[in-house]
Image (cartoon, helix red, strand yellow):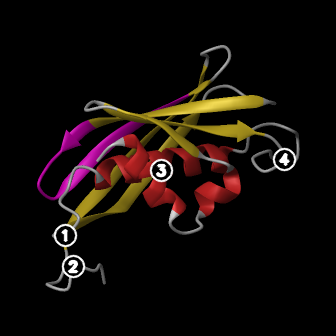
Amino acid sequence: MNLDKVKAWMAARPTLADSLGIEVTELTDDYLEGRMPVDGRTHQPMGLLHGGASVALAETLGSIAASLRVDPSKQATVGLEINANHIRGVREGWVRGRATALHVGRSTQVWEIRITHEETGALVCISRITMAVIDLPASGKAA
């Protein structure tokens, strides 16, 4: 799948990613990258990037990346676990996340998502998501 197809797939129905302004920006054989604005949609009450918004960015990128590693007519990927360490606060601008596979197996995948401040490159959050790979029923739709 190429980047334009991923963007069209994301645009096909409204999601949390739309509400938070998450955009997928780059897709290679090694990683998937996206960005998210740091503004009123993603702030916590103290005016900093909300940790939950960082986790939403991480899960969005990790989930999309994982789904690109299976045949969508036969399998789907679903989240099992996600964790995050919040390293540095951000008040404005954009953060960029890069999802890189640590393990792509037959029944699970593990992805690392590094979130950095777009302007400075400073590490903001590091997250890891574990995805289950499930077989679809003959109809091709997840239960």
Residue drawn at x 34%, y 46% is: 65
Residues under numbered marks 4 and 1 in contact, where contact means CB atoms less than 8 Å apart? no
Q: Are marks 2 and 1 in contact (CB under 8 Å)?
A: yes
- Amino acid type, mark 3: Lys
Work out whether mark 2 precedes mark 4 in sequence or the reverse, and give the earlier one: 4
Q: Residue at x 15, y 70 (%)?
A: 74
Q: Mark 2: give few (<14), some (14-19) or many (20+) Cα within 10 Å.
A: few
On the image, numbered disc 3 is attached to which residue? 7
Residue in the foreground of this view, choosing between 47 and 138: 138
| Residue at mark 1 | 73
Of badges 4 and 1, the one in the foreground is 1
The amino acid beneath tag 4 is Gly
Disc with the residue nearer the chain's start (2 vs 1): 1
Q: Which residue is mark 4?
A: 40
Measured in 3D between alpha carbons, the distance from the residue under mark 4 to the one under mark 3, in whole angstroms, is 24 Å
For label 3, count other residues whose C-alpha is less than 10 Å away and answer few (under 14), some (14-19) or many (20+): few
Circle 2 is placed at which residue position?
Answer: 140
Q: In the image, 71: left or right of 92?
A: left
